Image: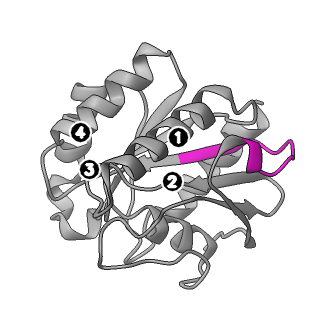
Amino acid sequence: MKQLQANFIISAEKLSQCPDFSLPEFPLLGRSNVGKSSFINALANNKKIAKTSNTPGKTRLINFFNFADKFTIADLHGYGYAKVSKEAQARWQKYLEEYLLNRSQITSLIQFIDARHDIQKNDYQMREWIQAYNLPIFTIVTKMDCIQRGKVQQVIAKVRKEFGGDVLPFSAEDRYYCESTIKYLTDLSEKQ
């Protein structure tokens, strides 16, 4: 199975601390515990490259990962859950918006949706914000291993109907869709 050598680069709280390089960049957006860190680990075939947790809201910084000098993935903190003060949440939101709107390396945002659940209110809110700024985006539907094989296309079609654009299935558990996802990201990167 195809995989790309990956390594952690750096964590940054805000745009001014982000690494200065020219690789195409893919920020990961999604609710806490939707599987963003597991996605990174599965693509890299390394369960320890990105920290995963059963406790929502653990990612507090923008964590950058280099995939074979082809592209970078930026793991962002999840939305919709965090046991932190309102001040901290407001600061995160300010830094996140600054990063998403001004980072020139961003090729496309990736929004993650959990296949086991209906699209949530905060998923729609995030998508509306992204569309308001006309930012490039596609969707990855995670935890597909929890869905019966016969219902995979139904789940994908439902998300596509709601959000439009490209929708890719993914399972970090069995790595079933890793190869096609790597190809998709690589093709997008080469169009940069």
Q: Secondary structure at mark 4?
A: helix
Q: Residues within 10 Å of mark 3 (few under 14, many from 20)?
A: some
Kind of residue sitting beneath label 1: Leu
For discs 1 and 2, the disc positioned in front in the rendered view: 1
Q: Are marks 3 and 2 in contact (CB under 8 Å)?
A: no
Q: What amino acid type is highlighted by mark number 4?
A: Asn
Q: Which mark is residue 122?
A: 4
Whole-number angstrom distance, CA of label 3 to CA of label 2: 13 Å
Looking at the rendering, the stretch of residues picked out in magenta corresponds to 16-27
Q: Which residue corresponds to mark 2?
A: 76
Q: Nearer the viewer, residue 98 or 37?
A: 98
Marked residue nearer the N-terminal end (1 or 3): 3
Residue 88, numbered circle: none
From this view, report whether residue 176 is shown above or below residue 117. below
Task: Give residue 18's position: percent from left, percent from top.
Answer: 74, 49
Label 4, residues with CA under 10 Å away: few <14, some 14-19, many ≥20: few
What residue is shown with label 1? 96
- Work out whether 140 lies above or below 1: above
**Quarter location, residue 2:** bottom right
Q: x, y (%) of residue 119?
A: 18, 42
